[in-house]
Structure formats: C-alpha cells, structure tokens
Image (cartoon, rainbow, N blue to C red):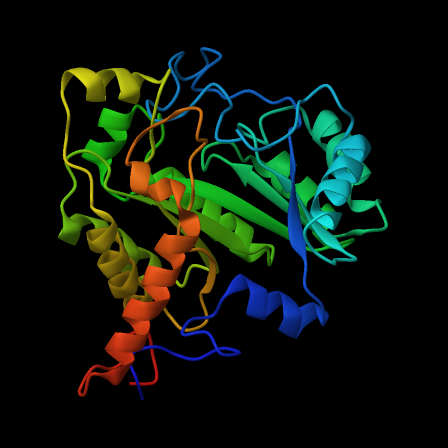
C-alpha cells in the first residue's frame, strides 16, 4: 500500500469522484445567499463576528441576497454554462449562518431549492450551535426528498484559538451537532482553517486527528485568509503574525490526507480568498498552483518506501 489511497486516479477520496460514482455525472455547486445573519453578529452571542470573517459572512462569492432562490440558481447555471457542461447541481447555502431563522422561513427557502428540477443535493453551511430539535426535524424531512449535507465551520478543536478568533461556540457544540445529524443519516462536512494565530503544526494536525477519530463524512481544508476590513486584518497590520508558506501548507495538507480515513470525502484542499479583500497570504490567490503543488508532493510521497496510508488498510 502506498502513502495514499487511490480513487478514480486521485490519491484521496475526492468530492468529484464521489459525485461521479454516486450519481453517474459531474455536478457543481451553485452558491446561494439566503439573506441570513449570524448570532455572533446580531447580538444574541456577540456583535463582532469571527474576527477572520468578512462582511460577506464567508459568502463573498455568493450572489446578492435580494434575488430569489430560484433566480440565484438560474444565474448560477448560466455562469457555470460558460465554463463547464453540467446538467445537475448542488444548491449551496453559503453566506452567513443558514439555519439561523424560523423553521417556517427555512422550510420555504429549502423547499424552493430542492424542488428545482436541476438541483440534486442541498448543502447548508451553518454554525454548530445553530441547530435545534425543530430544525433537525426539518432537515430530516428535507433529506427524505433529496440529499442534505450540513457544513459545519469548526475550523479548529482548540478552545484557546476559538476565544482568540471570537467564534462564540465550543467544541462541545460541534460534537452535539455531529451526533444529532448522524442519528438522522445526514452527512457532516467539516471546515478546517490552517495557520490560525498561535497554532503550531502539531496543533493543526491534532484537529485532523480528532476528525479522523470521529469519522467525519467530509472535510474542507484551506489556509487562513487575512482580509481587509476585518478585525483580523486590522490586528495583522499592527501585530503581524506568522503565516504558513505555500510549501509548508502543501506539506501540511499531505500530512492531513494521510491521517484522514480513506472514506472521508475531500471537498476542498485549498481555497482562494476574495482578491479585492485579500491582505495575506498572497500566494493563496493562485489556487491552481497550490493544487498542482499538492498533487506533485503526493506523487513524490507515493514513491517513498515504507510510508503507509495511516487512515486505514495499513
């Protein structure tokens, strides 16, 4: 066994391979802005939000919220048609906290998305502390119509970092949310950020080990983006802190992939922050170069003798 499990030519279980194997076709996400806010912004928990989060609420690439869900889907389809040939799509509720509303309002939004004939999957980004029994019952109902994925922004397992980043939730919130969603058969996709201030390499990998032990269904990995017009951006200007280089990030990603179970679906290996807001690290703006560097490093590791895939089947 080499260092990485191979899935349809990839050295990890990629989202692309999962979609093709499960649905027999390629699908892309259409980002949706449902006009939500966040309890860490509106005063319920706090007012400043997570200090790394922009005014777009992690939905900087999502369309304006004044368009209906159907209109946003149609706009997304047209934009994708310029670049790819795709018949069906994933409706991705991306901006802010997409379970932070009344059940009646959420039902209206979700139903409008899943009843669209070209939408096959509903993916909902939210906070671990913004799920309750009524919302879980709604998600169970929707999941019986079309598959539902819940994307939870954990970022790190370290409580001290959460306090520094002003996230407003705890690891126990994530654990509760995961347990309840898994009881309903709803997959959890966990977001992780590398190079958060104060975290060293082992702490970052501790987050991955934790998720590996909990058999997370999917994961999104990306570098910390220091953005203009955020509290983190203001802090960075006055107190510059160390950020991983591209080479260090690539090496860390490869270590993370070796630790994760082979069944874990990799939804993202790198990301690119909004170019008009990105302060540092500027190397993240060339997503293709980063991705190709990860692939090359994995191939090199495959050629080493005595390195085994740590996620299973050793």
Taking the image as shown, residue 123 lies to the left or right of residue 4, namely right
Taking the image as shown, residue 228 lies to the left or right of residue 64, namely left
Place of residue 105 in the rendered image (x, y in percent of width and height, measured from the top left): 73, 25
| Residue shown at the point (69%, 40%) measured from the top left | 138
Q: Is residue 162 above or below residue 301?
A: above
Taking the image as shown, residue 160 lies to the left or right of residue 271, namely left
The quadrant in which residue 164 appears is: top left
Of residues 63 and 197, the one nearer the viewer is: 63
Q: Is residue 99 above or below residue 117?
A: above
**Picture quarter with the N terminus:** bottom left
Taking the image as shown, residue 73 lies to the left or right of residue 269, namely right
Q: Is residue 155 visible?
A: no
**Picture quarter with the C terminus:** bottom left
Place of residue 82 in the rendered image (x, y in percent of width and height, measured from the top left): 72, 47
| Residue shown at the point (49%, 12%) measured from the top left | 42
Q: Is residue 33 visible?
A: yes
Place of residue 186 in the rendered image (x, y in percent of width and height, measured from the top left): 59, 55
């Amino acid at each position: 066994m080499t260092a990485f499990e191979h899935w349809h030519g990839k050295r990890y279980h990629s989202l692309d391979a999962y979609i093709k194997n499960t649905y027999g076709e390629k699908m892309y996400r259409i980002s949706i802005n449902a006009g939500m806010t966040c309890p860490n912004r509106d005063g319920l928990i706090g007012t400043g939000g997570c200090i790394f989060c922009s005014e777009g609420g992690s939905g900087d690439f999502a369309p304006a919220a004044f368009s209906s869900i159907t209109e946003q889907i149609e706009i997304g389809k047209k934009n994708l048609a310029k670049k790819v040939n795709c018949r069906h799509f994933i409706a991705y509720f991306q901006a802010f906290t997409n379970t932070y509303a009344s059940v009646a309002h959420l039902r209206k939004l979700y139903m409008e998305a899943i009843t669209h004939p070209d939408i096959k999957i509903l993916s909902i980004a939210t906070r671990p502390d913004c799920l309750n029994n009524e919302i879980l019952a709604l998600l169970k109902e929707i999941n019986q119509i079309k598959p539902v994925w819940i994307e939870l922004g954990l970022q790190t397992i370290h409580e001290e970092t959460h306090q520094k980043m002003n996230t407003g939730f705890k690891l126990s919130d994530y654990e509760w949310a995961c347990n309840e969603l898994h009881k309903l058969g709803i997959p959890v996709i966990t977001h992780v950020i590398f190079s958060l201030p104060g975290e060293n390499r082992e702490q970052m990998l501790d987050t991955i080990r934790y998720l590996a032990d909990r058999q997370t269904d999917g994961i999104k990995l990306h570098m910390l983006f220091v953005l203009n017009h955020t509290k983190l951006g203001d802090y960075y200007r006055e107190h510059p802190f160390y950020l991983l280089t591209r080479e260090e990030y690539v090496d860390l990603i490869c270590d993370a992939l070796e630790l994760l179970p082979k069944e874990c679906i990799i939804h993202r290996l790198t990301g690119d922050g909004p170019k008009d807001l990105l302060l540092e690290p500027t190397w993240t703006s060339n997503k293709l170069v980063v991705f190709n560097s990860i692939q090359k490093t994995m191939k090199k590791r495959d050629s080493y003798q005595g390195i085994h895939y740590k996620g299973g089947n050793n």
